[in-house]
C-alpha cells in the first residue's frame, strides 16, 4: 500500500513536469492533489518535495537512454541510403555524419529542456544528472560519436569532443544566469536555448565535418 502511494506521487510529479510545469513552481500540495493523496504523504514517503522531484526526474531522464542509440542508427541509415543511391564512400560518410549530428543536437536539446524543467530553485537535480550521472562519462556520448564521426578519427580527438560538448552543457544549465547576463540570451527560452546548442555542436564538430567531406556542420 505504501509503495503504491509513493508511486502515485512520483507519477503525479512526473506528469506535471512533462506537461511543462517547472519543478521550482510546483508545490507539495499541488503534486499531492494530482496524485489524489494527502499533502502530508509527500514528506512521509520522500522526506521533502525536492526528493520527490528527484525521483520523478529520474523517470524523465531515463527516457533518454534509448535515444543515444537512435543517433548512431540515424547515421547508419543515412550512410546506407547514400550508398544505395550511388554515392561514393566519402559521400556516404558525409551523409552519415550530417544525419548523426542533427540527431545528436535534437537529443541534447531535449535533455536540456528536461533539465530546465526538473532543476528547481536548488538545481540539485540537474547538478546530479549532469555532474554525477552517466552524462559526464563516455558511457553514452563516446560510442555515439564513434558512430557518426569519420572512420579513423583519433581517439584523443573523440574524447576531447565529448568533453567540450558535455562541459558547456553543464555550464549552461548550472550557471545559466551568468551566461544570460554575459550574452544577452535567455536559456529559459526553448528557441534561444536550441540556437545555443546548434552553435555549440556545430563549432565543436566542425573540424570533423571537413574530414567527412563538407566544410561545416551548419545547415541553417
Image: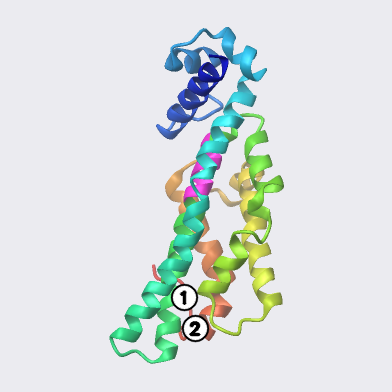
Q: Give x and y (percent) for residue 75.
A: 43, 72
Secondary structure mostly seen in magenta is helix
Tag on residue 97?
Answer: 1
For the image shown, how many numbered marks are present on the structure? 2
Looking at the image, is 66 positioned above or below residue 50?
Answer: below
Q: Is residue 26 visible?
A: no
The residue sitting at 47% across, 26% down in the picture is 11
Q: Give x and y (percent) for residue 42.
A: 58, 15
**Residue 88, quarter of the rendered image:** bottom left
Magenta range: 110-117
**Residue 100, quarter of the rendered image:** bottom left
For the C terminus, the image quarter is bottom left
Say if mark 1 contacts mark 2, CB within 8 Å.
Answer: yes
Looking at the image, is 41 positioned above or below residue 63?
Answer: above
Furthest toward the front, the residue is 1
Tag on residue 212?
Answer: 2
Amino acid at each position: 500500500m505504501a509503495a503504491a502511494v509513493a508511486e502515485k506521487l512520483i507519477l503525479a510529479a512526473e506528469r506535471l513536469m512533462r506537461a511543462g510545469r517547472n519543478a521550482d513552481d510546483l508545490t507539495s500540495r499541488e503534486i499531492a492533489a494530482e496524485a489524489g493523496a494527502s499533502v502530508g504523504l509527500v514528506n512521509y514517503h520522500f522526506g521533502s518535495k525536492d526528493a520527490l522531484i528527484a525521483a520523478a526526474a529520474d523517470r524523465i531522464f531515463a527516457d533518454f537512454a534509448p535515444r543515444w542509440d537512435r543517433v548512431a542508427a540515424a547515421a547508419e541509415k543515412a550512410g546506407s541510403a547514400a550508398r544505395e543511391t550511388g554515392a561514393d564512400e566519402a559521400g556516404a560518410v558525409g551523409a552519415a555524419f550530417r544525419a548523426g549530428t542533427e540527431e545528436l543536437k535534437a537529443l541534447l536539446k531535449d535533455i536540456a529542456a528536461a533539465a530546465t524543467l526538473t532543476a528547481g530553485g536548488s538545481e540539485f537535480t540537474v547538478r546530479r544528472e549532469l555532474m554525477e550521472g552517466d552524462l559526464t562519462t563516455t558511457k553514452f556520448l563516446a560510442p555515439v560519436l564513434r558512430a557518426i564521426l569519420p572512420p579513423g578519427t583519433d581517439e584523443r580527438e573523440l574524447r576531447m569532443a565529448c568533453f567540450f560538448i558535455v562541459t558547456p552543457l553543464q555550464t549552461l544549465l548550472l550557471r545559466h544566469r551568468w551566461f544570460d547576463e554575459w550574452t544577452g540570451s535567455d536559456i529559459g527560452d526553448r528557441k534561444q536555448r536550441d540556437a545555443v546548442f546548434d552553435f555549440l555542436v556545430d563549432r565543436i564538430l566542425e573540424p570533423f565535418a571537413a574530414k567527412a567531406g563538407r566544410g561545416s556542420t551548419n545547415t541553417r
